[in-house]
Image: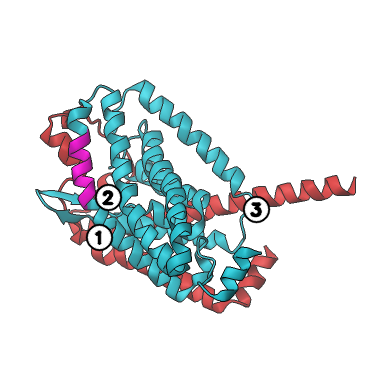
Chain colours: A cyan, B red
Amino acid sequence: MHIPDGFLDPKTWGTLYGASGGMVGYALYKVRKLDEKKIPLLGITAAFIFAAQLLNFPIAGGTSGHFLGALLACVLLGPFEGFLVMVVVLAVQCLVFADGGFAALGANVFNMGIIAGIASYYMMMGMKSVLARRVGEKKALLSSTAVFSWLSVVLAATCCAIELAVSGTIPLTISLPAMVSVYMIIGVGEAVITVVVLAAVLQARPDLVSSYKGTRVTAGAVAEEAA
Amino acid sequence: MSSLKESFANNKGLWIFFGCAFLVALILAAVFSPMASKSPDGLEKMAKDKGIASKAKEGTGALKDYAVPGIKSESTSTRISSVAGVFIVLGAGLLVGLLACGLGHLRKRQGAGADEA
């Protein structure tokens, strides 16, 4: 859902450039204590997400969808590191591959970095913390990630539809149902890929998953919580 | 950066993991990218169906539309541009990581200076 130039009016893309630019500054501030171990992980996660985004899969009605990866990046690296990874991917796609307009880059970062990334991450962590006490942290993380990776794509599409409507490109009554219905299907693919990759990383290197602390539902964990 | 070197000397498993993850990205780009569906994505399809597609302005980029100018074979063109993209994104991601890490060190040094004073 990379918005090309011409779909957004200056007040919309200008506002969203401001919001996204501000978030880039805040994210750089938040990750200033970045562990050196995370530097290669940042680059490799960005490269993996870029590669996975190349692979459009067909869905019904002559439409295709592709992986987004915003929530995956945030779950693996932390919300602000993950956001910066998405900024890198979106900026390269825009500047080198003309995928997404230059004026629309702020809007694309807003939809696919802030909404599908940071905002979805915090909602996911809310569900995870509720579930973790019942089913253990690993299952809680995987199931919350499944739900919110789906929702992250639907929410990003909703924002995209609203932005197009606010710009006067297309009425919301047309853009919203059209976008949401398609991305509800694409979101299923997003959830499957995100959960498979997350499960693989949890299996191989659970220490690299920033949103996973490795606590289990045991007497120790309960005691820790009580303390 | 010496601590970075040390941390990896003591942590071969981590390097192997990073290598494997990057290899997966390269394989996706080099082998599977030409197999991607050519159908429009959700936004493009809506734009087409609702008659706003003509409003889209063509962008510019060295590898516009994931193709290398001058290469006739579509799949070769897609493969090369995709692999190039993986390396560019890796480099840009590492740069952002270094930048963030550098900012932290700068702050730490300033913090140490303040403590001495």
Q: Seen in the image, is A146 located left or right of residue A135?
A: left
The front one of A109 and A44 is: A109
Q: Which residues are magenta?
A: A176-185
Q: What secondary structure is marked by label 1?
A: helix
The answer to whether residue B18 is magenta is: no
Find residue B23 and report its image quarter.
bottom left
The C terminus of chain B, quarter of image:
top right
The front one of B70 and A89 is: A89
Any mark on residue B66, and which?
2
The verdict on a common chain for dots 3 and 2 is no
Any mark on residue A33, and which?
3
Cα distance between the residues tagged 1 and 3: 36 Å
Q: Amino acid at mark 3?
A: Lys
The front one of A136 and A38 is: A136
Main SS, magenta region, reads helix
Residue underneath mark 1: B33
Q: What secondary structure is marked by label 2?
A: helix
Q: Amino acid at mark 1?
A: Ser
Q: Amino acid at mark 2?
A: Tyr
Q: Chain of mark 2?
A: B
The residue sitting at the left extreme is: A61
Q: Are marks 2 and 1 in contact (CB under 8 Å)?
A: yes
